[in-house]
Structures are given as structure tokens and as C-alpha cells.
Amino acid sequence: MTDPNDLAAFWAQAWQHLGRGVADGKSPARYPTFATVSPDGMPEVRTVALRRADSAAQVLEVHTDIETPKVAALRQTPWASLHVWLARADLQIRATARVDILTGPQVQADWDRVPAASRVSYGTNPVPGAPIDHVFAYDKPPDRDRFAVLRCHVAKLDLVHLGARHRRAVFERDTDWAGQWVAP
Ligand SMILES: Cc1cc2nc3c(=O)[nH]c(=O)nc-3n(C[C@H](O)[C@H](O)[C@H](O)COP(=O)(O)O)c2cc1C
């Protein structure tokens, strides 16, 4: 068993779960809750699929349609919070990240890897959130020009582990990820 005082092991465990979320569609880390601040300053959340987790670069990536309201939110406030609850591991992961919205030629390689069946998630007509006359009064042509990668540069990671004694730690880029135990 790993030393419960080991901050580095706690950090590594969180990134291992995030990596598994990318690789395994059945992992609860596959579908984080992604929070942004709307242009009028309101909190907003939605489920997304985790597409990349790079522990060395501290980067998480999500794919989206540039016409979704979350992109308008990020254009104004380029910060997001990602939340995952891993019930079997009794672990909550919260990441605060500065988000780059990548489109066009810089995401061509990502688009090439998106399965044909999934490409229809990028290009809904009318745009996501627009009122429609009937429940199915929309179509979903794939549109590469609407495809975006949200590259989330993690600035802070807050981990909570519910054990016999709870553990919580905060890791911040500003302190070179040294990590700090905090009261849970
Ligand atoms: C299981 C699941 C996975 C989803 N994955 C994504 C995703 O990877 N990217 C995305 O933009 N929306 C995804 N969605 C849809 C969003 O939750 C949301 O409805 C949509 O993106 C519009 O969000 P917005 O209006 O807040 O921008 C997913 C929804 C579910 C239920």
C-alpha cells in the first residue's frame, strides 16, 4: 500500500485515473463535468468527454463545437473547472485550467482521428441551444470548420480522498506542483 502521506503518489494517482478516462469509455473519468463562467457572469456546467490527459504537460483536452455556448463563455473568460468523482476509488478530482480554443489547421490531426459516427457532434443545424419548432427539427452534418479542441492548461488540482481518514491536497502550477495537504 502506498504511503498516505505521499503527496507525489496522490498526484500520480489522480493523473493515472485521468489517463484511464481517456483510454477507457467505461471509466468515470471519461465524462468530467466541465464548468465555465457565462458571458453574463453565471456559473454553467455540462458533461464532456475527456480526450487527452498529459500529466507531464499538465494538460487536459476536450472536443467541442465552436458554436456551443461554452465556447462563447470561454472567449470571454478563458477558465474552466473540470470535476470527476471516482466512486470506486473514493476520489474527487477538481482541476482549474486556462483554456485555449484551438480550431482549423491546428486541429486537423485531431479531426482525422474522430470516428465518422462522432463527427456529427460538430456541426448541428441550427446551432446548439437555438429554439426549434419540433423536437427533431435539426440535422447534424459533420463540419470540420466547427470542430474545436479545448486545450486546458491545468493551474490547480484539488484532490479529495475519502478513506478511514479523509485526505485532501491542493497542487498549483505557481508552486511547481509541490502540493499542500489541506483540511478536507
Ligand atoms: C455523456 C455526454 C458526453 C458529452 N460529451 C461532450 C463533449 O465531449 N463535448 C461537448 O461539447 N459536448 C458534450 N456533451 C454535450 C454537452 O453536455 C452539452 O449538452 C453541449 O455541449 C452544449 O453545452 P453548452 O450549451 O453548455 O455549450 C456531452 C453530453 C453527454 C451527456
Image (cartoon, rainbow, N blue to C red):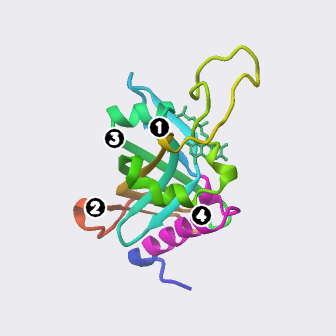
Disc 3 is placed on an element classified as loop
Are there few (<14), some (14-19), or many (20+) residues within 10 Å of tag 4? Answer: many
Is 21 included in the stretch rendered in magenta?
Answer: yes
Q: Position of residue 115 (x, y in %)?
A: 64, 57
Residue 173: mark: 2
User: Which residue is most to the top?
Assistant: 133
Residue ID for mark 1:
66
Q: Main secondary structure of the magenta part?
A: helix
Q: Earlier in the sequence, mark 3 or mark 1?
A: 1
Specify whether tag 3 is near ligand 1 (CB below 8 Å): no
Q: Amino acid at mark 2?
A: Arg
Disc 1 is placed on an element classified as loop
Q: Position of residue 71 (x, y in %)?
A: 44, 36
Q: Amino acid at mark 4?
A: Gly
What is the magenta range?
Answer: 10-31
Query: Is mark 1 in CB contact (under 8 Å) with mark 2?
Result: no
Are there few (<14), some (14-19), or many (20+) residues within 10 Å of tag 2? Answer: some
Q: Quadrant of residue 112?
A: bottom right
Are there few (<14), some (14-19), or many (20+) residues within 10 Å of tag 1? Answer: many
* 2 vs 4, front mark: 4
Disc 2 is placed on an element classified as helix
Residue ID for mark 4:
21
Mark 3 → mark 1, Cα distance in angstroms = 14 Å
* 1 vs 4, front mark: 1
Query: Is mark 3 in CB contact (under 8 Å) with mark 1?
Result: no
Disc 4 is placed on an element classified as helix
